[in-house]
Amino acid sequence: MKLLQALFFPPEQPGGVSSMIPYLQDKFNPPEWEMELFSLPKRIRGKGTDQIKFHTFDWHQYDQSSIVRKYIQTYRDYLWWTKLRLQQSYDLIHAHHPIAGLVMKEVFPDTPVVQSIHSSYERELILNGKIKEGGLEHRFLCSLYKELELRTDRMLTVSQSFREYLSPHVQHPERIGVIRNGFDDTRFKPIPHHNEVVQLVTVCRLVPAKGLDVLLRACAELKKRGLVYVLHIIGDGPIREELEQLAEELGIYDETIFYGYTLHPEEFMPFFDIFVLPSRAEAFGSVFAEAALCNLALVGTNIGGIAEQIEDGVNGLLVQPENHLALAGALEKVIVDVEYRCQLAGAGLDKAKNYYSLKRVVHELKNIYLHYKR
């Protein structure tokens, strides 16, 4: 069976898709399976000129928005690149971005397209202060879900909570399948170690949606309480300078290390003690599963896919978003009580191995793919 995994970003980009899809290739072995990866290179900008038409709505009613126009141009570019680069046929295409799915169905109308939705671009834009809830851009992006429902052959997402999020935007939410992300656990090698000073780590894109301002305020509270720690922030993004300034204003700049973007954080994540990320929204939160596989204690917010991964007090700790005092309290628990921290980390590792293995994802995907075998 000849498969195409249609990504939007190149597979080396950070995120849940890139932490899973490239590793599927080794599990779909010839001659029964052949798998290719496809994505839009960053250098492709402004190449496409095709007229874009959707079946369920007229996008021109939103074209006053520069964000919508940019999205449509990206659609045109992806369509241009697909027509240029893909000349052969496939038995099935699995798309991992709305643009990828709609373009693939346009170029290969007779080929089954399975569409996975990994996150909410519109929610991210709202939380990052780029668009307004209920505005033109929000309505445009939400309209795409019904278009995907009509044109693709199967819709999947990564958590029950995200399926609930999608439900108002489609006609048949009960038909959306859930396949949680999976990880090749051979990439993660927990290392026995002892840090005299507790090492906190977070890995994410530096944008408002990740709640790092809340984390810095929580860490300032920890320092006020006399607790000693180091916070490692791995990732880059548009608010890095703002976060560095906030750390300085809060008096915790010396306790905070900003690394910038790192390609394989899992290689040194096992040397830390606690993973913390107070996201304001998260469809799945792959980095929590990755941190658990590194045997770190987990502290996150009680939202979306994070709350499906963490059972509070069993394999990690959950707090409400936006509450830096509650976050400081949770961090204090796992900083001062080493035994409790190790207990949470061990339970988190066990759950991640059992629930988020790549083998499980491969088995579930093969069952879906074989349904469309001709």
Image (cartoon, rainbow, N blue to C red):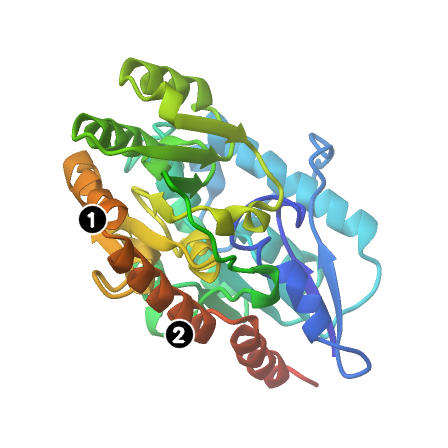
Quadrant (top left/top right/bottom left/bottom right) for the N terminus: bottom right
Mark 1, Cα crowd under 10 Å, few <14 / some 14-19 / many 20+, is few
Mark 2, Cα crowd under 10 Å, few <14 / some 14-19 / many 20+, is some
Relative side of 6 to 346, left or right: right
Query: Where in the figure is residue 154, as x and y percent of width and height?
Result: 51, 71
The residue sitting at 48% across, 67% down in the picture is 155
State the image quarter where residue 323 is shown.
top left
- Look at the image and tell me whether residue 126 can be seen: no
Quadrant (top left/top right/bottom left/bottom right) for the C terminus: bottom right
Query: Where in the figure is residue 255, as x and y percent of width and height?
Result: 37, 26
The residue sitting at 29% across, 49% down in the picture is 300
- Look at the image and tell me whether residue 106 can be seen: yes
Q: Secondary structure at mark 2?
A: helix
Residue in the foreground of this view, choosing between 273 and 172: 273
Residue 272 position (above or below residue 179):
above
The residue sitting at 53% across, 30% down in the picture is 259
Q: Give the amino acid at mark 1.
A: Lys
Q: Secondary structure at mark 1?
A: helix
Residue in the foreground of this view, choosing between 195 and 249: 195
Q: Which residue is mark 1?
A: 333
State the image quarter where residue 174 is shown.
bottom left
Q: Give the amino acid at mark 2.
A: Arg
Q: Which residue is mark 2?
A: 175
